[in-house]
Amino acid sequence: MFGIVRPCRHGMCSGLFKEWMAHLCGLCLALRDEHGHASRLVTNYDGLLVSVLTEAQTVASSPQRRAGMCALRGFKGADVVEAEGVRLAASVSLILAAGKIKDHVADGDGVYARKPVAAAAERVAARWSVAGLRTAAALGFAPDPLTRAVEDQTRLENTPGLSLLELTAPTEAAVAAAFGHTALLAGKPHNREPLEEAGRYFGRLAHLLDAVEDLARDRAAGSYNPLIASGTDLETARRHCEDALLGLELTVAELDLERRRLVRALLVKEVGHSVTRAFGEAATAAGSEKKNPQAPPDDPRLKPDPGGLLSLMCVTMACCTCGLYRPPWDEDRYKSCGERCDPGGCDACGSCCEGCSGCCSCCEGCSCCDC
């Protein structure tokens, strides 16, 4: 599970965290039920926003079903979302994951340079692509911006002299299309334009923050990074992120939503935390490089490089056990199930709202979630 939106139970009111978990588990189970167990590997935090936005625009809450025990919930059952928004999130996740795998295979990145791994990955990508496109068609979603995103990104990365925002354009277009379609699913077509605008801002942030988080590692390995390619320093990148964050907040405020709290908590508060976290870690990494330029701590060459077949087997094992099994090199191996669901924990997120008891159930104007 990955993404720039990483809420935890310590930084979000309990009611909202439960809602978010219902969407997360709903996406995971929708992928399993419609596309097979292995497709759960594409479950990601940011994809959930599509499901959250769809529900937030509808008068009635999304239908839910009772799910069985899961290792990531401490072997407890839960009520999970079962609606068109979850299916759209599954479709988007599958299509983008398939495109990304194809791109890795074409570039021969890491373990994908090995023919057995590349062949297996191509088969998985083809299966996910077909599954995602089939679900998109059933939902009336035209996935062209998503399928073009990876191709356009590859082309732009091979074109010198482009600006940073030119490099983020395909990601912006893909997210805009996904966000915009939630308005049609929810029966509020007038929301489509502002949602597409919100999608462009979020796509820009996702692309930039990913580049910032990978900057030290990409520089050490000599890999492509949009910040390096465009000659953008961290200060300028931070300014672009702050501008996009402000635009996202203003656009969210314009939306016609039936339930606004979870959308605001994720797209405003948690994305803001992501910006702070990414640039804080980047500054720390930059300081470490200056102190020890010969062996930066994030240098991937200093980390274990398990074989391709071993990696594939471990990923499959982790998927089949819902994340209970983690390989020896996984940083979450010795964490509890709760800690794996709460990236960073209390120290990383801070408290929900100081001095507020019964948040979201009785208090008005709570600053942590706009309730």
Image (spheres, grey):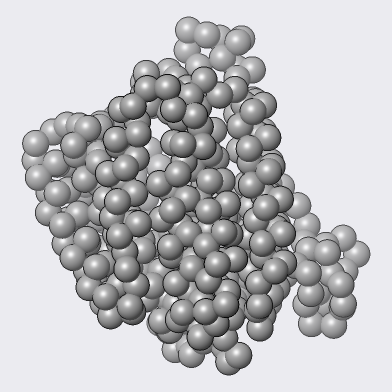
Reply above or below: 335 against 369.
above
> Which is nearer the eye, 47 or 156?
156
> Which is nearer the eye, 70 or 271?
271
What x and y, as percent, mark residue 280?
67, 33
What x and y, as percent, mark residue 207?
49, 42
Q: Residue at x 52, y 8 (%)?
A: 293
> Dividing the image into 4 quarters, which one contains the C terminus?
bottom right
Residue 86 seen by the camera: yes
Reply above or below: 79 against 212.
below
Name the quadrant containing residue 178: bottom left
Q: Which residue is drawn at 56% across and 9% down?
A: 292
> Which is nearer the eye, 19 or 268?
268
Q: Residue at x 72, y 59 (%)?
A: 250
Name the quadrant containing residue 306: top left
What x and y, as percent, mark residue 355?
91, 64
Residue 70 seen by the camera: no
